[in-house]
Image (tube, grey):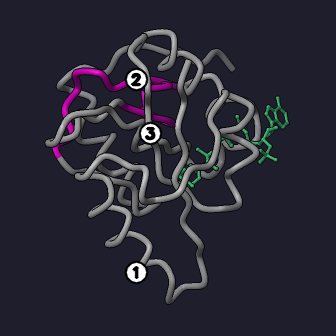
Amino acid sequence: MDIEYRGATEGDMDQVRALLATVRGDPERLSHRRCLVACAHGEVIGCVRIKELATGGKELSSLAVAGDWRNRGIGSRLVSSLLSMEPSRPLYLLCFAEREAFYARHGFSVISPDELPAAMRDEYSRVAAALAGAGHKVIAMILVR
Ligand SMILES: CC(C)(COP(=O)(O)OP(=O)(O)OC[C@H]1O[C@@H](n2cnc3c(N)ncnc32)[C@H](O)[C@@H]1OP(=O)(O)O)[C@@H](O)C(=O)NCCC(=O)NCCS
């Protein structure tokens, strides 16, 4: 199966939002700009984006791959394409603790939530509190080069 990787268009965004909703992904200030999608049969099966933080700084956000398409390298390809497209560093992200090795393969390392830009510290508190009840630990990571 051929999978197409490309920049998102406005017309993709309903499918991107629907995909993010299935994984409780972050739809805040979502735009097709700085968003990449993976498509199969003309459908969006994966997405990732750069989110500009209100207080300055950039976050890798909204990574999702549809359930049937996981564990084939699609998520990794989306992340490496996004990192090539977005040269500015540092980049930050929040993720489940069990995803640390996945992002470490792309050069990210764990930091204390105190080291996050101000806008992300608030986001971290919200996300960590929301997911703690479900037994998920959330970590903060940074890519410096
Ligand atoms: C996280 C997520 C985006 C990963 O997408 P994916 O397409 O499955 O990612 P990859 O296939 O590149 O990598 C997943 C695993 O498959 C392995 N893999 C990569 N290519 C592979 C291949 N060709 N064949 C088999 N396995 C492969 C990777 O080594 C990786 O192993 P790991 O989980 O131990 O790190 C996906 O699981 C998802 O959408 N999860 C729900 C939302 C989420 O958690 N988003 C991230 C926010 S923290």
Q: Amino acid at mark 1?
A: Ala
Q: CA distance from mark 1 to mark 3?
A: 19 Å
Q: Which stretch is magenta?
A: 29-49
**What residue is pinned by disc 3?**
92
The residue mark sitting in front, 2 or 3, is 3
**Disc ID at residue 129:** 1
Q: Residue furthest front?
A: 114
Label pair 2/1, CB-CB below 8 angstroms: no
As helix, strand or loop, the secondary structure at mark 3 comes to strand
Identify which residue is drawn at 22% across, 21% down: 33
Report whether the residue tagged 3 is closer than 8 Å to ligand 1: no
Identify which residue is drawn at 33% across, 26% down: 35
Q: CA distance from mark 2 to mark 3?
A: 17 Å
Identify which residue is drawn at 37% across, 37% down: 59
Label pair 2/3, CB-CB below 8 angstroms: no
Q: Amino acid at mark 3?
A: Tyr
Q: CA distance from mark 2 to mark 1?
A: 29 Å
Report whether the residue tagged 1 is closer than 8 Å to ligand 1: no
Mark closer to the chain start, 2 or 1: 2
Where is the N terminus found, in terms of image quarters? Answer: top right
Q: Is residue 15 above or below residue 37?
A: below
**What residue is pinned by disc 2?**
36
